[in-house]
Amino acid sequence: MIVLSGLYVVEMNLRDWRADELRPHYEYTVKIDGLSGTEVSGTTKILVPIPATKEGVFAITPSQEKPSFFKSLLQEYVFHTPEKYIRGIYFENTTESLDNKSLNGNWTTSIVSTKHGPMLEFRTNESVLADISFSKIVVLEQMNNEDPINESSPILYPIASEVSSVGEDYQYFRSMSRVITYETYIEMSDNINSKDIINKDIKFDISLEVYPDVTERDGDKGTYKNKLDVVVAESGELKKNATIETYF
């Protein structure tokens, strides 16, 4: 019984403390190239789509779960597990992961409210700009890959147009894919539209890759990838196409 109990706790610990990449999660990446070396005056602000449902609600992150009484006793008195691990793992939600972060070039992130809903803002007071590179992983309570827009799964929000589907295609062996296209927003403050940048392209590469729990049966299925990949040479609020490709 003691051996079985020990094996049970070891197995549960491995599952409880497995890497975030093995759980349902999204990987959100923002890369903005072409800014480096640009001279500006005043505060520079760039707004990009943020992971949220089509209603602008951030996806639910699992709450911290305390272990059972029996498991706590085994961990504390048999395996002498440190207290911080007995309490159970804690996951940062979207706000904690994305808001108020510092990047190279003295850029800071902020989740801001706009007329379209929440967006992620990058802000700096530097007179010479640097390119932006930002990436975070957020663990999810649940996700739906077959219809992420209508099933409250995270997408690059906001949606600025009607959604169109490209249909279904046998892209991979025993796996199907569907491509969805819609418009979303990006915005750059007017001080970027200077003589130094009129003939300079700025490349936005924003991706949201959503993955299921790979430890579950058929865990290799259920991925979808949301991308906005555009080049711009103007400031202000811009509508740009984003795509979602689902695999199932």
Image (cartoon, grey):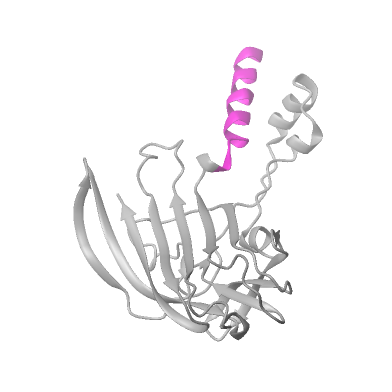
Magenta part, dominant SS: helix
Residue at image point 51% right, 53% down: 26
Q: Is residue 186 left or right of residue 101?
A: left
Residue at image point 33% right, 79% down: 162
* Magenta stretch encompasses residue 3: yes
The stretch of residues the image draws in magenta is 1-20
Residue 244 in percent (x, y) is at 36, 62
Compared to residue 15, the image places residue 204 above or below, namely below
* Magenta stretch encompasses residue 179: no
Compared to residue 152, the image places residue 62 above or below, namely above
Compared to residue 184, the image places residue 168 above or below, namely above
Residue at image point 66% right, 14% down: 2
- Image quarter for residue 218? top left
Q: Is residue 230 left or right of residue 76?
A: left
Residue 27 in percent (x, y) is at 52, 53
Residue 60 in percent (x, y) is at 56, 59
Count of residue discs: 0
**Depth check: 75 or 235 in front?**
235
Residue 132 seen in the figure = yes
- Image quarter for residue 38? bottom right
